[in-house]
Image: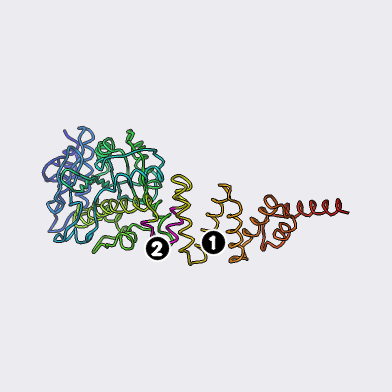
Amino acid sequence: MKLADRVRRALGSDAGPVRANGAEGSARVAETEGRPDHRIYELRRAIGRIESRWAGEVSAAVTRPVLRARAAGPAWVRTSAVPMLHERGCAREERFGDTRLEPPGSEALAELLRVAVGTGVMRPEPHELLFLDTETTGLSRDAGTLPFLIGVGSFRPEDRRFAVQQFLVRDPAEEAVVLEALEQRLAAAKVLVTFNGRSFDLPLLRNRGVLARMRLSLGLPHVDLLLLARRLFRGRLPSLRLGELERSVLGFHREGDVEGALVPSIYLDFLRSGRWDQMARVLEHNQLDVMALAPLLGLVASHVADPLEWAEDAEELHALGVLHLERGDPELGERSLVRALELARASGTRREVLVSLARRLRRTGRRAEAATLWEEYRRHFPQHPLGWIELAKHHEHVTRDLARALALAEGAPGDHDDGSRVARLRRRLGRGAADGA
């Protein structure tokens, strides 16, 4: 006798058989006097999970027409595609206005991967980019957090569309098959694009793969757009959340979108009740998150590849200049810093640019030019000791004007650790005076 039949006999239930993959299955809520009996519903879900585990099958819920979903093997998948260049006329597309969902230029993408990711020379095809975003039951990465919805997007150049696939864990027992479906997409990709994936999505998925005894192909070259947004836009945006970047940088906003903080509770309510109305909103939220990554990648790639053409303010020019000095084109980085200094009006920005440019000049042997910038720094920011100390170093080691070096070292304001320089200069000047006598 099946376990389900034993439980029904014990309960005295006359309900029909519960099948893991039946047309009704565990998604049907038992009705008692016109109201759902959640105890019976939850029990049926539990029975379905147990039977499917013994049968080697995964329990399946009814796919409601409103979600326009289709089954792909054992995993629940929803696939949607929109034109790369959105046109007016569709309510969903109007949220993006005329924003292009086109792949970044080959040269710009290659430069972004080289500079921001460190891949060397790499020119992936548009369809080899995989955009990924997850919806989870919490914000931690421990074993209690479940990525119940995984959205992946990719370009389809053959029909000029951007396609989004979403894998939904309708029941915790389905997680393994969802991860297997994700692995198929990862295996076909060459570059992964996320927003905060480095700190959250990828470590969480890696942990879930370990728990499911599978290794996901998450070692792809990875562009985390949040890290780049922090470099480029932190000077002019109140927040670096994806929604703020959509409004302030990409120029579109969402209407009627579900709040991200409500997503875990909506999913838990779905597990308890089987209601799909709010889950449909969560799927659309996730879809829009994935879609937003495509134009953001294109914008960031163009800014990194040609900061003098695309950067919009001194803060961004400074960030891109430093990025190129560290990992990209040093000459382009220096030109970006020079232009940033010309545009800088905020005192904090000007001070940061002066430091970056002066250090670049000193490292490349142009010590006199660097000293000129340090003098400007000391003149405009006399309360900061850095300009005084750098000029003291310059006069001690380059011009050999020990008296000037000592005056600057002694005059440096605030609490700084340069006492050894003062003592050394005093000794050297004392020896010089004794030799002269």
Q: Which residue bears the numbered disc 2?
A: 237
**How many marks do you count on the picture?**
2
Relative horizontal placement of residue 271, taking residue 64 as reference (left or right): right
Kind of residue at badge 2: Leu
Query: Residue at image x 62%, y 66%?
Result: 382
Relative horizontal placement of residue 40, taking residue 386 as reference (left or right): left
Mark 1 crowdedness (10 Å alpha carbons): few <14, some 14-19, many ≥20: some
Query: Residue at image x 57%, y 59%?
Result: 373
Q: Main secondary structure of the magenta part?
A: helix
Kind of residue at badge 1: Arg
Task: Estimate the x, y position of residue 256 in percent, counting from the top left.
Answer: 23, 63
Task: Specify whether residue 78 is painted magenta.
Answer: no
Depth order, front residue of 236/275: 236
Query: Residue at image x 28%, y 38%?
Result: 189
Residue 237 versus residue 276 in the image, above or below: below
**Magenta range:** 309-320
Q: Which residue bears the numbered disc 1?
A: 351
**Badge nearest the viewer, 2 or 1:** 1
Task: Estimate the x, y position of residue 404 in percent, counting from the top left.
Answer: 72, 59
Depth order, front residue of 410/335: 335
Q: How is the image coloured?
A: rainbow
Q: Quadrant of residue 156?
A: top left
Task: Estimate the x, y position of residue 82 in percent, counting from the top left.
Answer: 18, 52
Task: Estimate the x, y position of residue 72 in percent, counting from the top left.
Answer: 17, 40
The answer to which of marks 2 and 1 sits earlier in the sequence is 2
Residue, far right: 437
